[in-house]
Image: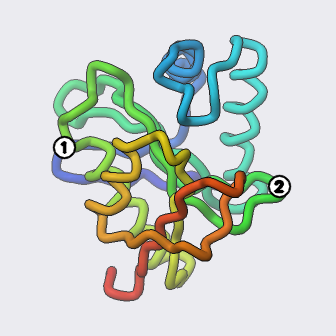
């Protein structure tokens, strides 16, 4: 299976690379990960990251490594996640500290939403967000999503944001 490469004005979304893991492990070893998947050591981070990357082979979608077009610098990860037991495909993201506040996650997420609509014909994607993660909730809403009070998350108190993809592409 071939993982596509997507381009936006400022970003390249491409297949994950082994060197991306160093950024991923650093992020999830830091307190910034508390409201994502939780802080985890390197071994646990490897298992989760490798599993996410493997989703590409198993489901035909997964996380994209995101880098700046002008410098090639890694800025984070945005993609569609659906581990076993998830209620459906989820649009998720994270950016490294140096990339925060620059709109990279929103730009990449929009590209993934359009790609998902064009390639899978999906009408809907969701975000599953810890209620304490105000920045991710704000981004999900800024992307045009609406809070779905009946949406199913991983935990009963998760905020589920639904995105209607029918107007895209």
> SS for tag 2?
loop
Residue 93: horizontal and vertical position, in percent? 46, 44
Q: Mark number for residue 27?
A: none
Nearer to us of marks 2 and 1 is 2
Residue behind mark 1: 10
> SS for tag 1?
loop
Residue 83: horizontal and vertical position, in percent? 76, 52
Residue 141: horizontal and vertical position, in percent? 32, 62
Q: Nearer the viewer, residue 66 or 124?
A: 124
Left or right of 45? Residue 94 is left
Q: Mark number for residue 84?
A: 2
Residue 10, quarter of picture: top left
Left or right of 58? Residue 63 is left
Q: Residues within 10 Å of mark 1 (few under 14, many from 20)?
A: some
Left or right of 80? Residue 82 is right
Reply above or below: 81 against 23: below
Residue 12, quarter of picture: top left
The image quadrant where one finds the N terminus is bottom right
Residue 39: horizontal and vertical position, in percent? 63, 20
Count of number-bearing discs: 2
Reply above or below: 41 against 129: above
Residue drawn at the location 33% of the way across and 44% of the way down: 105
Residue drawn at the location 21% of the way across and 43% of the way down: 103
The image quadrant where one finds the C terminus is bottom left
């Amino acid at each position: 299976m071939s993982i596509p490469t997507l381009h936006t004005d400022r970003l390249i979304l491409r297949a994950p690379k082994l060197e991306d893991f160093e950024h991923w492990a650093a992020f999830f070893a830091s307190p910034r990960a508390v409201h994502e998947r939780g802080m985890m050591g390197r071994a646990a981070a490897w298992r989760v990251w490798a599993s996410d990357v493997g989703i590409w082979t198993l489901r035909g979608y997964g996380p994209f490594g995101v880098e700046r077009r002008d410098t090639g610098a890694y800025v984070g990860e945005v993609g569609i996640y659906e581990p076993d037991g998830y209620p459906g495909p989820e649009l998720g993201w994270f950016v490294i500290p140096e990339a925060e506040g620059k709109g990279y996650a929103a730009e990449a997420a929009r590209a993934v939403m359009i790609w998902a609509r064009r390639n899978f014909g999906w009408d809907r994607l969701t975000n599953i967000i810890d209620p304490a993660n105000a920045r991710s909730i704000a981004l999900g809403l800024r992307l045009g999503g609406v809070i779905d009070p009946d949406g199913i998350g991983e935990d009963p108190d998760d905020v589920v944001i639904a995105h209607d993809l029918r107007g895209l592409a």
